[in-house]
Image (tube, rainbow, N blue to C red):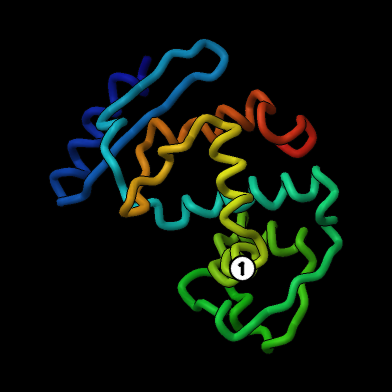
């Protein structure tokens, strides 16, 4: 209840600074929600890295990849926006496990680019279809807080990845 009471003031404070804010918080064990602008679309920025991790882990679960498999860093993968992998020489190899850790822990853009380059649209489409997220991104690649929260729900319920890979 304290969060439900405080959230409107928190959002108002950010909006007063000119920020666009959307919140969708669900207590997964009860289904109770706190929602403010939950259907408004926002540019996901680094939030797009979580669906990439889903795709990669599904390839591992399906036996297409192993966490120990190596992927190569190309010049076009390098991004200095977030993370440090861009500092490595072109041609360096990284295990999929190390790329996932860099992606999820450090929000490393270079790790993201390597993983995306090695997956394809079919992987993404399979994931969004399995989760009922066909409209996850609109034509501008924007997402809603409510739809994005379904990724966390699928982790909690292990409805896309198996239990071990969802934790």
Identified at 86% across, 61% down, the residue is: 68
Residue 35 sits above or below residue 51 on the image: above
Give coordinates of residue 28: x percent, y percent.
54, 19
Identified at 47% across, 50% down, the residue is: 47
Number of residues whose C-alpha sits closer than 10 Å to that of mark 1, classed few (under 14), some (14–19) or many (20 or more): few
Kindly indicate the quadrant of the structure image that contains residue 94: bottom right
Kindly indicate the quadrant of the structure image that contains residue 96: bottom right
In the image: residue 26, left or right of residue 5: right
Residue assigned mark 1? 117
Give coordinates of residue 58: x percent, y percent.
72, 44
One can see residue 167 in this view:
no
Kindly indicate the quadrant of the structure image that contains residue 4: top left
Give coordinates of residue 158: x percent, y percent.
69, 28
Quadrant of the drawing holding the N terminus: top left
Identified at 65% across, 23% down, the residue is: 157
In the image: residue 153, left or right of residue 136: right
Residue 131 sits above or below residue 69 on the image: above
Closer to the camera in the image, 74 or 130 = 130
Looking at this view, name the residue that lies furthest to the bottom. 89
Give coordinates of residue 5: x percent, y percent.
28, 20
Closer to the camera in the image, 160 or 155 = 160
Identified at 76% across, 30% down, the residue is: 163
One can see residue 24 in this view:
yes
């Amino acid at each position: 209840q304290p969060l439900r009471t405080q959230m409107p003031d928190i959002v108002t404070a950010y909006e007063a600074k000119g920020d666009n804010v959307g919140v969708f918080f669900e207590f997964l064990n009860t289904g109770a929600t706190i929602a403010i602008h939950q259907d408004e679309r926002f540019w996901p920025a680094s939030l797009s890295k979580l669906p990439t991790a889903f795709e990669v882990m599904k390839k591992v679960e399906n036996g297409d990849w192993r966490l120990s498999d190596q992927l190569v860093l190309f010049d076009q993968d390098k991004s200095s926006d977030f993370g440090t992998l861009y500092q490595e020489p072109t041609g360096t190899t990284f295990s999929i496990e190390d790329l996932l850790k860099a992606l999820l822990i450090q929000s490393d853009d270079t790790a993201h680019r390597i993983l995306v380059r090695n997956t394809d649209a079919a992987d993404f489409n399979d994931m969004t279809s399995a989760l009922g997220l066909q409209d996850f991104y609109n034509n501008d690649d924007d997402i809603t807080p409510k739809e994005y929260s379904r990724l966390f729900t699928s982790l909690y319920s292990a409805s896309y990845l198996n239990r071990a890979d969802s934790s």
